[in-house]
Amino acid sequence: MDIETRHILECLEQDARVTHEEIATLTGIPIEEANKRIKELEDAGVIRKYRASIDWDLAGDEHVYAIIELKVTLERNRGYQAIAERLYKFPEVRSVRLLSGQYDLSLTVMGKTMKEVAFFVAEKISTIEQVQHTTTHFVLKTYKEDGVILQEQEENNRLIVTP
Amino acid sequence: MQKKCNSERFVADVMTKVPPSGIRKYFDLASGIEGVISLGVGEPDFVTPWHIREACIHSLETGKTSYTSNYGLIELREEISKLYSHKHSTHYDPDSEILVMSGVSEALDVAIRAITNPGDEIIVPQPAYVAYVPSVMFAGGVPVPVVTKLGNHFKLTAEDLENAITPKTKAVIMNYPNNPTGAIMGRKDLEAIAKVVSEHDIMVISDEVYECLTYNGSHTCFATIDGMKERTILLNGFSKAYAMTGFRLAYALAPSPIINAMIRIHQYCMLCAPITAQVGAIEALRNGNEEMQRMIRDYDRRRHLIVSGLNKIGLECYEPKGAFYAFPSVRNTGLTSGEFAERLLHEQKVVTIPGDVFGPAGEGFLRCSYATSKNQIAEALERINRFMESL
C-alpha cells in the first residue's frame, strides 16, 4: 500500500464524515486525485461501509448480546462455508467467525432480552442439522469495541504553553 | 544585633543577564482565560503508547527502583547503538560513546559545559530553541547568534556560519528538524556546513530530538557526514518521537573523550536518568516503531491542514519539512509578532508563540504548534481568520 492510500484510509477510519475536500487538504493530494482514489477503494471493497460507532446502551435502547460457541459437523465438499452462510443470513447474528481450538464457530447474537436471545439460539441455531453443540455466553458489559473504548477516555493534561 | 540581609545580592551576576523564558509569559497570559485553543504547546498531544507505560508499570511491580550505571542501563545503550547501526549505518560503542541522560535539556547543558572554557564562543543559529543561549551563558561561554532566513527556508548556510567564526569559536549548535521553524537540512546542506566546521576546527552540538518527525524523506544525521563523527555531540531523546515528554529521557552520542568529560558532570549533577524511564525507553526502541509511525502520519496530515489554512487566511507560511511547528509570517499585518500574538489571544482566544521569543531573528513570525487535534486546528484557523478580518 502506498503512503497516500494509507493516509486516505486512516482519515476515513478516524472520521467517516470527513469530506473529500478535507481529505485532499489533510493529505496534500489534489482533489481530483483524492476523488478517484476513494472511488477505487470503494469499488475494490477496501472501504466496505461508512458508519457511526454507536453506544446503544447510552442511547437508552438497550440490547442484549451473546457470544455463541458452536461445534458443527461438516458437509461433504463444502467445508464450513455452507453452515456459515446459513448462519449469517439471520439479522440477529451480528458476526460469524471460524476459529481454531475446541469449537468451530463463534457468533455474536443480538436481541432485546436474554429470553429472546436464548429462544433464538434454541429454535434457530441449535435446530440446524450440522450444529452438534452450542454454548451461550451473555455479554454483561462491553468496554471496548472495534478499537473504540466505550468509556471516559483518559485525558492528556498538557500545560497550555510549553517550550 | 543581626545585620539586615538583602538576599538578592547572593544571586550570581549571570542570572541578571538571562531573562526568564519568553514562552512563560504566554503561559501566564493564557492561563486565566476560558475557552482557549492552544497552538503554543511544544509536546505531542498523544499520551505515551500503552505498551511503553505497561513496561514501566511492570518494572515498578518487580521492584526495579534502584540507581543505574551513570551511563544508563547497558541494555538501553545497546538498543541505541543498534538503532544507529540500522538507521544511519554508523557505530557508537555502548560502553564509551553513549550516555543516557534526563532529557535533551540536561544533555544540552552538560554538553556545553563539557567543552566550554570561559570566553569560548558558541554559535547559535536563530530563531532557536529557547534553552541554547542561556545554557551557553551559564557555562561561561559567549553565545554568538547567526540569523537564518525565510529565503533559505531557515537553513544555516555555510557562508553565514563562516562569517560568524572567530579564533574563539568552539562550537555551533545545530537543531534540525528545527524548533521553532520546522526547517530541516538535507545531506548536501550539511556537507557544506561540515566543510566549514572542518576547516575551522570547531565542534558541532547537533540536537536531533525531532529526527523522527521528518516528512517526505528521511533525516540525515549530522554525525554521518564524512569526518563529522569525531566533531559531533549528537543529542536525541524519546519525548517527541514516542510522546514521552514527562519521562525526561534522552541520550548523547559523542567520541569517548567527550563522553568522558560529560559523564563527570552528569554523575555529580544527575547521577543517572530515572530507571523507570530507561525501562520505558528500551520498550520504545524494541517495539515502538509502529505506533510512532502512526503518530507521524497524523502529524503529517495536520501539517498539511495548518499550512494550507494559514496561507489561505493570508499569513504566508512556507512548508515546514520537520518537527510539529508552522512558522507563518505576520509582517503583512503591520503588527509585531508580540502584538499579533497578544491581540490574537485576547480577541480570539488562540495561543501562539511570537517568533521573537526565539531570538530577534524570529521577529515577524509566529510559532504555531500542530501537535493538537484536527478539530482544534480547524477551529483555531477559523478564529485566526476572524482576527485577520478585524484588522
Image (cartoon, rainbow, N blue to C red):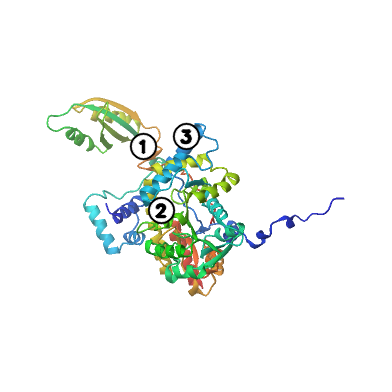
Asked if badge 1 and badge 3 are on a common chain, one would say no
Q: Which residue is mark 3?
A: B58
Report helix, strand or loop for mark 1. Answer: loop
Answer with the quarter of the image where residue A86 lies.
top left
**Quarter location, residue B66:** top right
Kindly tell me whether residue B133 is visible in this rendering. yes
The kind of secondary structure element at disc 2 is loop
Please provide percent x and percent y for residue B140: 62, 59
Q: Which mark is residue B212?
A: 2
Chain letter for mark 2: B
The three-letter amino acid code for the residue at tag 3 is: His
- Residue B314 visible in image: no
Nearest to viewer (mark 2 / mark 1): 2
Side (left or right) of B134 relative to A111: right
Circle nearer the N terminus (2, 3): 3
Q: Residue at x 35, y 62 (%)?
A: A25
Marks 2 and 3 sit apart, C-alpha to C-alpha, by 27 Å
Residue B32, compared with residue A126, is above or below; it is below
Q: Amino acid at mark 1?
A: His
Q: Chain of mark 3?
A: B
The image position of residue A76, as x and y in percent, is: 12, 29
